[in-house]
Amino acid sequence: MWLLPRCAHRTQYLLLTYLNDQQLPWPDASLPAPVREAVKAWHKLAEDHLETELVTAATEAGLASKANLKETKARSVGLALRGEIDLLAADPVRHRIWIIEAKHLRQAFSPLETGARIADFHGQAALATGPGIHKYRQFRSRNFRPYVQRVLSNTRAVLQSTDAAIRLMRRAESAQDLTTGVRDDWEVIPLLVTTHIDVSAFVTDPQVTFVQIDHLQALLTASQAPPPGP
């Protein structure tokens, strides 16, 4: 009588957590194909909503921005990206350019999920913190690039072609006053936005800043640039 209500409450909480993350608490392989497709479409709606929230936060912070910047569009103005940028935003007041990657991921609970999540963000070696610890075996294709590597790669591309990035945002936000000046005037900052606090932000060397979407606008308007990590 003492255990059962407690277990029932935890089960309810776990199920609610999965549903809030647009997921079901069962492996995809165990679900009928129509259910898998429905859950996939449901999750895509949540991802699209998160990207809309990025634009809203940047606009309300007074930034010029270009959402869903793809490699072909960037290449047309001389910006060589390696993958899409979810939001490229420029702050003409603080002279910052933000390279923002958004991830709507369900919360990780088990050790296996936690290891996989950290590897997805930082690569297989992130958990090998000592000479006697093996790399995490990541169940991904060889072509998979960790999220942090993606955003850092695009940050380097923008650093090399800041003027091209400014031109893209000037086209998207013609009303914004973006005076490029010299390239060194702009601070280019990589940023990962998530829907909840993610374990991947707490590794020894996170390299980029992590922020929840609810706190994004405050971060964009802060007087000091944020350090890597949560």
Image (tube, rainbow, N blue to C red):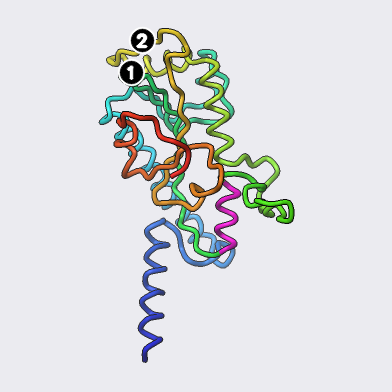
Residue 57: percent from left, percent from top:
30, 35
Residue 28: percent from left, percent from top:
55, 61
Q: Give SS at disc 2.
A: loop
Mark 1 = which residue?
Answer: 92
Q: Nearer the viewer, residue 203 or 104?
A: 203
Query: What is the span of residues highlighted in magenta in the rendered image?
Result: 111-120
Query: Label 1 sits on what residue type?
Result: Pro
| Other residues around mark 2 within 10 Å, as few (<14) / some (14–19) / many (≥20) | few
Q: Residue at x 60, y 49 (%)?
A: 119
Up-down relation of residue 149 to residue 9 (above or below): above
| Mark 2 to mark 1 CA distance (whole Å) | 7 Å
The disc at residue 179 is: 2
Residue 200 inside the magenta-drawn segment: no
| C-beta proximity under 8 Å, tags 2 and 1 | yes
Q: Residue at x 55, y 40 (%)?
A: 147
Query: Label 2 sits on what residue type?
Result: Thr
